[in-house]
Image: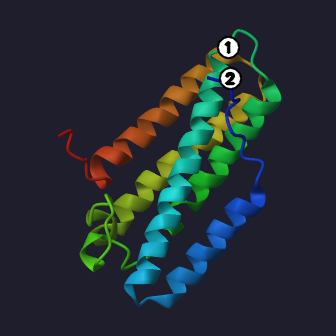
Amino acid sequence: MRFRPPRRLTRPMHALAISALLAVSAGAHAGTASLQQIVHARQEHFHMLGRTAKSLRDQIVRSHPDWTVVSDDAHRLQQLAAQLPSWFPAGSGQGHGVKTRARALIWRDPRAFARAAHALFSRARDLSRAAATHDRRTMLLEFRALGHACGSCHSRFRAHGSWW
């Protein structure tokens, strides 16, 4: 098996295209196809968030991290966290004919979801600021805090799939 370095998020046009698709789809309001596009775009955003977090973790656990990559990844996480609430427009939940693991609580209690999203953004912002210090220990602590923010949101707002 050939070694492949982790994919970097150097494709801003890909992210822009997904964001544009989400915006266009959110404006459509009707039709299963547009709802499926919204959910697909949301899932792509979360995959991007996960890949970026993995890339960042892989760097900060190294004895000599590439601080440019660390800084870029931390900044990208902050950007994605800021956009997260827009990934859940009204009518894009399970009861609207699309398959998603987003719980209805997101739309029933938007203030609670907004608080959770803001907590993620705050942690991502702290992580981005810590990246400027080039201190691995601080980065690890901030990365853990970011993980806790992700986990608390998942436990409350994401339906868990079966292991079977």
Q: Residue at x 40, y 89 (%)?
A: 31
Total count of labels: 2
Query: Residue 164, located in which quarter of the rendered image?
Result: top left
Q: Amino acid at mark 2?
A: Gln
The residue beneath circle 1 is 62
Q: Residue furthest front?
A: 1
Q: Residue at x 58, y 40 (%)?
A: 51
How dense is the environment of label 1, judged by Cα within 10 Å: few (below 14), some, or many (20 and up)? few
How dense is the environment of label 2, judged by Cα within 10 Å: few (below 14), some, or many (20 and up)? some
Name the spot of residue 46 as percent of width and height, x first.
51, 52
Q: Looking at the image, do the residues carrying marks 2 and 1 touch, with CB atoms under 8 Å apart?
A: yes
Q: Can residue 120 be seen from the camera position used here?
A: yes
Which label is found at residue 59? Answer: 2
Name the spot of residue 77 as percent of width and height, x first.
63, 45
Name the spot of residue 123 as percent of width and height, x first.
55, 40
Name the spot of residue 125 as percent of width and height, x first.
64, 43
Is residue 123 placed above or below 98 in the rendered structure?
above
- The residue closer to the viewer here, 118 or 85, is 85
